[in-house]
Amino acid sequence: MKNLESVGADVGSDELAAGLERLFAVWRRLAVPGGLSSTAAFTLARLSRDGPGRLTELAAHENVSQPAMTQLVSRLESRGLAERFKDPVDARVVNVRVTAAGEALVALRRAARARQFAEFYRALPAGHQAALADALPAVRQLADLGSRRSRA
Amino acid sequence: MKNLESVGADVGSDELAAGLERLFAVWRRLAVPGGLSSTAAFTLARLSRDGPGRLTELAAHENVSQPAMTQLVSRLESRGLAERFKDPVDARVVNVRVTAAGEALVALRRAARARQFAEFYRALPAGHQAALADALPAVRQLADLGSRRSRA
DNA sequence: TATTGTTATACTCTATAACTATA
DNA sequence: TATAGTTATAGAGTATAACAATA
C-alpha cells in the first residue's frame, strides 16, 4: 500500500496506461468470427450489455455521427443482428435492440476472444495470475467510470 | 492465492476477459489528437516502441493486407510521421521507421490518453489503485506474450 | 423552432488482382 | 520461380450538408 499523497499514484497511472495501451494492441488483433467492423462490434456488444437504446444515444456513445449510426444499424438489421422499434412516447425516436441472432454472435465473439486470452493467461506465473484476478474489481470499476462519463 | 489445478484459473480468465473487453470499449473512445486512423495509430506506436520494420512485417502484425500497408505508410510519409529506407542486403525490401515528428505525435497521443486514464484511476478507492499497480507486471507480460505470438 | 432521424454526396481506408523488380 | 512491394480497381464505412417528420 502506497502513500496516497505522494506522486506515486500518478506515476503508477501513467505506467499502467502504457501497459494497457500495449495490451489493447494485442487484444484488437485477436481473431474473432462474424466479420463485423470495429464500431459494429462494439455497438452490438453495448446493446447486448446495456439493453436497447436510441439511435442518437448509440451514435454519441460510439463517437460516430448520427448518419453513420443510421447506416450501421441498417447493416446490423439487414444481417438480422439488431432491429429498430418505435418509442411509445416520442414518434421521432428510433430505438434499437439486439436480436437473438445478435446475442448469439456477441457470445460467440466473446468466447473466441476469451479462449485466446486464456492461452496467454495460462502462460503467466501463478503470482501474475493472482495479481490479475485481484485487479478484476478495479478493472470493472474503471469500465463503469468510463461508461458513466460518456453518458453525461 | 488459489489452487492452480482447479478450474478457478479458467473462470478467472473468462471474467477477466469480459472486464478487459469493457475497459477497452471505454479506452478506444478516449479523445486523442492527431487524426490518425486506428491502424495508423497502432502502426506508428509499434514502430516507435519496437524500432524500424519491414513493410510486410508491419502488414502481418496489424492484420492488414500488404497493399493496405503500402498506402498507410505512404500516408504517414506524406504527413512526415514515418519514412521508408532501403535494406542494405535485399533490394526488394522496404524498411520503415518513425520520424522525430512521428515520435512527438506518438508521445502526444500517449500523454493525452494517460491524462484521461489518470482521471478514472484517481477516482478509484486506494485498494483498487493498489491492486492495479500490483497487476502491472502481469499486464506487461500479457502484452509481451501477445506480441511474441504475432511474430511466429 | 428545436430535435430525431434519413438521404445525398464525397472522402478515407481496405481488399483482391495484376504488375514490376529483385532474389 | 518465389518473394517484396506497388498500382489499379472496387467496396465498406464515415462525415458533412440538406432534407422530412415530429415535438
Image (cartoon, coloured by chain):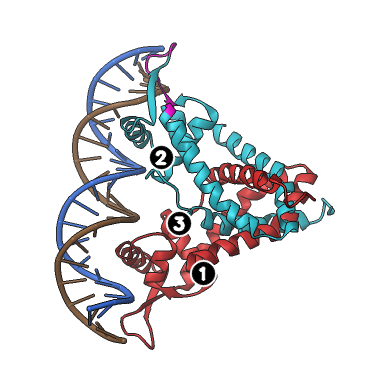
Chain colours: A red, B cyan, C blue, D brown
Residue type for callout 3: Gly
Q: Residue at label 2?
A: B40
Q: Residue at x 50, y 66 (%)?
A: A46
B69 within the magenta span: no
Above or below for B131 versus B144: below
Range of magenta residues: B88-100
Q: Are marks 1 and 2 in contact (CB under 8 Å)?
A: no
Q: Residue at x 70, y 45 (%)?
A: A8
Q: Residues within 10 Å of mark 3 (few under 14, many from 20)?
A: few
B97 within the magenta span: yes
Taking the view exactly as shown, the residue that stands out farthest to the front is: A5
Q: Residue at label 3?
A: A34
Q: Residues within 10 Å of mark 1 (few under 14, many from 20)?
A: many
Q: Chain of mark 2?
A: B
Q: Which quadrant of the structure image shows residue B69?
A: top left
Task: Kindly report the distance in space between the C-alpha atoms of the residues bearing marks 2 and 3.
Answer: 23 Å
Secondary-structure class at tag 2: helix
* Same chain, labels 2 and 3: no
Q: Residues within 10 Å of mark 2 (few under 14, many from 20)?
A: some
Residue type for callout 1: Ser
